[in-house]
Amino acid sequence: MVRTHRPLAKKAYGSLDQLLTARQAGPYHACPVVTAAETILYVCVAIMAALNSIYFKKPPLQPIWGMWPEKRKHINMKTAELVFIPFSAAGHLMPVVESAKLLLKRDHRLFVTVLIMKMPMDTGVTDYTQSLYRDSTDRLKLVELPQADNILELVRLPPFAFLSAFISSQMTQVRSFIADTKNRPGSTPLAGIVIDMLNTAMIDVANEFKLPTYVFYISSAAFLGITSDLESLSDQHGQDVTELSDDNSCDKELSFPSFFNPVPSKVLPSVVLDKEGGSTTQMSMSKRLRETKGIMINTFLELEPHALKYLSDDEKTPPVYSVGPVLNVKGGGDGPSTCHSEYSDDPVISWLDDQPPSSVVFLCFGSMGTFDGGQVKEIANALERSGHRFLWTLRRPAAGESQNPEEVFPQGFLERTTGVGKVVGWAPQKEVLSHSAVGGFVSHCGWNSILESVWYGVPMATWPMFGDQQILAFEMVKELEMAVEIKLDYRKEFLSTSTTAMVVTSEEIESGIRRLMDSGNERRKKVKEMKEKSRTAVLEGGSSYASLGRLIEDIMDNIPQPV
């Protein structure tokens, strides 16, 4: 009997020891089954204690973890909670929340609460927010903050004044939430708050509770460098940076350490050049970033080595963690719609399934990108003359514009392009970019869209709209040489009260599309190479994987080791 069960007992001991070793190794080595086996672990140890006593003639395990004293301390492992405060616009909320998910996936000791600051106007985040509520877990929770009583008064403020006032109006609710969390018995210790790059006012709340602040920066490392340098020009050298927008400065080129090439003043962000308070707001936010404990940037070392080196060498910049690409992607996806079951029946994907490989140019200008009727006609004429197949996401016209397609498009355009073109109000962008039929992407150059185009290896043509998009377009075309130019300085500001915008001619658009779809384009090859580097960066051993690990170590250092 003893002889029969002794090997079994030894094997059981070995299995348990492996389990405990994996459990002790922590988030970087413990596989999911270890966590799943937590409940039965104590039963296994009890059985081992009995076997130990019966077959090996040794005393029972006293204490129960006594055989593995080095593992026993894992029972009292420290945990940490982070409070994420994103800005509630589509291009901000999604990457910030995805970064929270990334942290949770990497380290099971972390817990996250995301505070949603609901804007008084629709910013394209409602559907995404609802999906987050459905997917919330005990480690990822969402809390929607109540709006301030004076929210309707804030809407009447000038754009940049509204931005500052809106964020300030939410500070009381954030303060109350953090106080309740810290005072709740048995709550997970707070390790800090993670704010959007626009929410720097929340640093004051963190300081009140003696909590460190981290920033999730949703733009490029080069853009972070340029805004930091502009703030230094303003704060330390007394330079009025808004003068760079004067007519006689439109062709002026400026030198910034985060860029190899001189930067034309015409591609600087409008907010920096704004004389009505926008510049002051931007300079203040850039300055306050220096008060944070670290900056997470949605980029990766192989994409922006020069800018990231500059930031890491810059003494006034906090530690920078390049953790990207942070994208909500499911699977690799480089083929037909079968790779994306959620959208496999979508008419857009079905249409792409019928197109030849790399034959379709995809036009999408973001959730806020709209054009007037005149510009729509220029785009339509360019597409038809280019001779390329196209998929065009055209947002609903602005108020006062015609809603009738026959009046918006050139006469007969839809009939003449049937079979080779498709115009829709919305398309699942990531699924479209991952489709083998798509050969080029005409984009507004939002940083999220840029990262998606790189991830899927689709070359871009630039048509920036607002915010940081002009400088990002310049970076892609001139600095990284991974995109072709349609325009670099087109502006149609989201927060601007101006109703005028330059018109991009059909000739300019057609030329850009032809260069974009040229199969021999050297930039196409560069994008394909960067695609592979982007995927390697987030894998174990990759640059972003390592950077995320360093960030987690820093976060956990904020929590004292439990006794």
Image (spheres, rainbow, N blue to C red):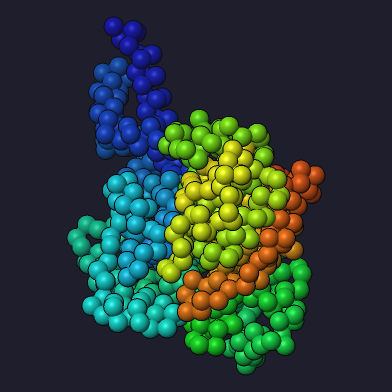
Image location (x, y in percent) of residue 305: 69, 59
Q: Taking 21 as reference, is 99 above or below it?
A: below
Q: Taking 372 as reference, is 286 above or below it?
A: below
Q: Quadrant of residue 346?
A: top left
Q: At 61% across and 34% down in the image, what residue appears? A: 355
Is residue 382 shown left or right of residue 78?
Answer: right
Image location (x, y in percent) of residue 271: 54, 78
Which is nearer the eye, 262 or 184?
A: 262
Is residue 363 shown left or right of residue 398?
Answer: right
Q: Quadrant of the N terminus?
A: top left
Q: Taking 15 as reference, is 510 above or below it?
A: below
| Total labels drawn | 0
Q: At 27% across and 66% down in the image, what residue appears? A: 145
Which is nearer the eye, 201 or 67?
A: 201
Q: Quadrant of residue 50?
A: top left
Q: At 59% across and 50% down in the image, what residue appears? A: 413
Q: Quadrant of the C terminus?
A: bottom left
Q: At 65% across and 51% down in the image, what residue appears? A: 383
